[in-house]
Amino acid sequence: MTIWTEPEQELCLEVWQRGGSFGVISDVIGTKSRNAVAGWLNRAGKHRPKPTEAKQPQRKTRRELIEEAFSLQFTFDHNRLPTSLIDRDSDGCQFPLGEKPFQFCNQKQVPGTPYCVAHCKLVYRTAS
């Protein structure tokens, strides 16, 4: 632990109040390391307020997404036929069909689930 003189403490507080970082304060003082500055300010109880973040819209829970899927109508897209896992579209339903070798449904997924509307209704149950 290093000893801080009165002028060093005053200079440290002055630069810190102007928004200087620990490294800048260390460079201005010249005799203290960045970590020494951080430690002294922490022990002195000097903390900068955290910037207020823009409030993020609340994400839907998995249950809400599934309940929403139950309200949707299934429409079969004839351009999206069952495929292997390797050939499956990135947003294709992951419900396995048939025996080995497996193929996957590949219809459009319900957002937040790995399945299409029809397979969500088959796999998930709503609270009754």
Image (tube, rainbow, N blue to C red):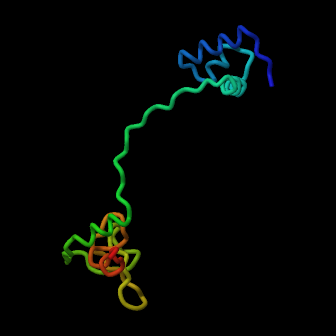
Which of the pair 38/93 is nearer the observer?
A: 38
Q: Where is residue 7 in the image (x, y as percent from the top left)?
A: 71, 8
Picture layout, residue 3 above or below residue 93: above
- Residue placed at 72% from the left, 23% from the top? 33
Q: In which quarter of the image is the N terminus?
A: top right
Q: In which quarter of the image is residue 4?
A: top right
Picture layout, residue 1 above or below residue 12: below
Q: Quadrant of residue 64?
A: bottom left
Q: In this view, does 76 lie to the left or right of 59?
A: left
Q: Where is residue 78 in the image (x, y as percent from the top left)?
A: 19, 78
Which of the pair 44/69 is nearer the observer?
A: 44
Q: Quadrant of residue 126?
A: bottom left
- Residue placed at 59% from the left, 14% from the top? 15
- Residue placed at 59% from the left, 18% from the top? 16
Picture layout, residue 80 above or below residue 55: below
Which of the pair 65/79 is nearer the observer?
A: 65
